[in-house]
Amino acid sequence: MKLYIKELREEKGYTQKELAEMMQVSFQTVSKWETGANYPDITHIPKLADIFGVSAGVLLGMEPLKTEDAEVKCDDEVYWNRKRDLLKVWKKFFWNEDYFRFLVKDVWSFKKPVDILDFGCGYGFLGSRFLPLLPKGSTYSGIELDQGQIDEAEEYFSNTPYKCTFFKQNIYDFKSKKKYDLVVTLFLMSHLPDPKKVIRIMKESLKPGGMILIMDANMEVEKAGYYSGLEREENGMSVPDLVPVWEYELSHGQRDYRMGTKLPYLLKQEGFHDIQARISDQVMVYEPSDPAKKEDNEDFRYVYEHEDSYEGGTGYFMNRGLSLDRANEIREYYDRTGEYFDKDDSIAVKTSGVYFVYARV
């Protein structure tokens, strides 16, 4: 049984000694409660719950512990700032560079200089990928709310021959003063409460005949494309069904887990034509026994261990509508997977679920 004494104590800002004084026990006793070496007497539970201002069910882990991720807003600056470092590593698994080059050169086949506008550009990742592949004279502009990300982008592009402009602004309020040949966004739509509104703003930013390109994921595709040797070693230890968790997030205005495959429908609703889609070719093979894959293996582990669902523990899933038993089952799977990854002979396959959906005005 997991008692949330440490989490609730830290949330209140109490030290172990202060809590011990309030409970009239030694601070060593509090420490043992928090590590699970010992449990409070049943007579202590009501007083602890009263000190923390929660129900006994929350204290005992039978009800969700309302952390800051419980009512997360996926379209605000705070959410993205928490994930900046993770996203930088994660992006290497979105697609293979030769496939992206093929799309730019052979599928989209831009023959003349292109003016690009990137919604939610961050530190200019898409610009750094597009501009070297486009005709000379192409430009890149980005909209970003975080000044730190803009500063990083401006520093990066200052050492390149490319012309770039950045706007510090909320994407919902953006009104373009010029028209662009190509308007893009990466992993933004699935986190927006009103993606149609942003698609309309993107459309208004395009030149006649211009192209919109939206890249986003379908998490069900990612899940279907995942396999590890743990399933073979421990019969029945397969990837848990996370759809109820994702459905909860969707119904509470957080992430839309199927956005990648919904995009053609949304573009059709907003009057785009010649709607087409591709899917990433990236398949990551985690294989720590292969020294040639050392960097990729380390990055794979970093992404796995820094995802919200891994770091959040049981409370993360309870905050998304699951029972304590079901949340514990999923947490156990994550823990066992982490242990399996530590083995030199472990192996895992993960498919990218990134969709490239593009259309014309």
Image (cartoon, rainbow, N blue to C red):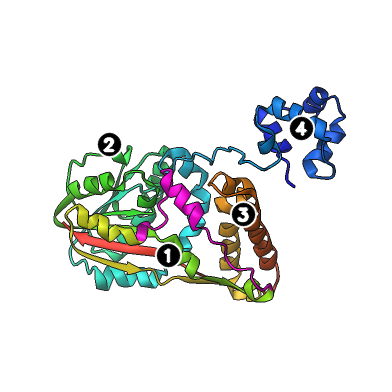
Q: Is residue 283 above or below residue 37?
A: below
SS state under label 4: helix
Residues under labels 2 and 3: Cα distance?
A: 41 Å
Disc on the earlier residue, 4 or 2: 4
Foreground mark, 2 or 3, reads 3
SS state under label 3: helix
Pointer 2 and pointer 3: residues touching (CB < 8 Å)? Answer: no
Residues under labels 1 and 4: Cα distance?
A: 46 Å
Q: Which residue is mark 4?
A: 45
Disc on the earlier residue, 2 or 1: 2
Disc on the earlier residue, 2 or 3: 2
Q: Which residue is mark 3?
A: 326
Which amino acid type is marked by label 3? Arg
Which amino acid type is marked by label 4? Ile
Residues under labels 1 and 3: Cα distance?
A: 26 Å
Disc on the earlier residue, 1 or 4: 4
Residue 249 sits inside the magenta stretch:
yes
Residues under labels 2 and 1: Cα distance?
A: 30 Å
SS state under label 1: loop
Q: Which residue is mark 1?
A: 353
In this view, the residue in front, 236 or 29, is 236
Which amino acid type is marked by label 2? Asp
Residue 79 visible in rendering:
yes
The residue positioned 42% from the left and 70% from the top of the image is 96
User: The C terminus lies in which quarter of the figure?
Assistant: bottom left
Disc on the earlier residue, 4 or 3: 4
Q: Which stretch appears magenta?
A: 234-260
Which amino acid type is marked by label 1? Gly
Q: Which residue is mark 2?
A: 173
